[in-house]
Amino acid sequence: MIDQQRSIIILMQYTAIITLLLDSVIHLQFSAIIDLLLDSLINLHFAAIIALLLSSLINLHFAAIIALLLDSVIHLQFPVIFHL
């Protein structure tokens, strides 16, 4: 009877150890998945910031070109007006 109780206790201890190990593996997996998701969100965030910066640079570039064209048109118009 004592041997049977001892073997049950040992079995319960091993079960507890295995459960803890499995639990820690599952938590490690979830934390790894969460880390990957956060990393991808951060990368997406940086990519979005870079895309916005590039977009604003391109828009600024186009705006500068349009401003130069408008400016040259205005400058062309004023001499014509003054000439008339």
Image: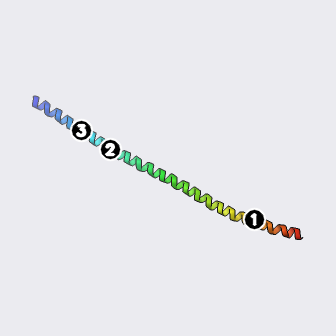
Please identify the quadrant where the N terminus is shown.
Answer: top left
Q: From the top left corner, tell me how far across and down residue 39 is, in percent.
A: 44, 50
Gap in Å between the C-alphas at discs 3 and 1? Answer: 77 Å
Contact flag, marks 2 and 3 (Cβ < 8 Å): no
The answer to whether 14 is drawn above or below residue 70 in the figure is above
Residue highlighted by disc 1: 70
C-beta proximity under 8 Å, tags 3 and 1: no
Query: In terms of secondary structure, where does tag 3 sit?
Result: helix
Quadrant of the rendering where the C terminus is positioned: bottom right
Q: Which residue is mark 2?
A: 26
Q: Which residue does the numbered mark 3 point to in the structure image?
A: 17
Kindly indicate the quadrant of the structure image that contains residue 51: bottom right
Q: CA distance from mark 2 to mark 3?
A: 14 Å
Which residue lies most toward the right here? 84
Horizontal arrangement in the rendering, residue 78 relative to residue 6 (left or right): right
**At x 17% / y 32%, what residue is drawn?**
9
Type of amino acid at the residue the image marks with label 1: Leu
Going by the numbered disc 3, the residue's amino acid type is Ile
Left/right of residue 71 with respect to residue 55 in the rendered view: right
Residue 2 in the image: x percent, y percent? 10, 28
Label pair 1/2, CB-CB below 8 angstroms: no
Q: Give residue 58's position: percent from left, percent from top.
A: 62, 62
Residue count near mark 3 (Cα–Cα under 10 Å), binned few <14, some 14–19, many ≥20: few
Residue shown at the point (80%, 69%) measured from the top left? 76
Mark with earlier residue (3, 1): 3
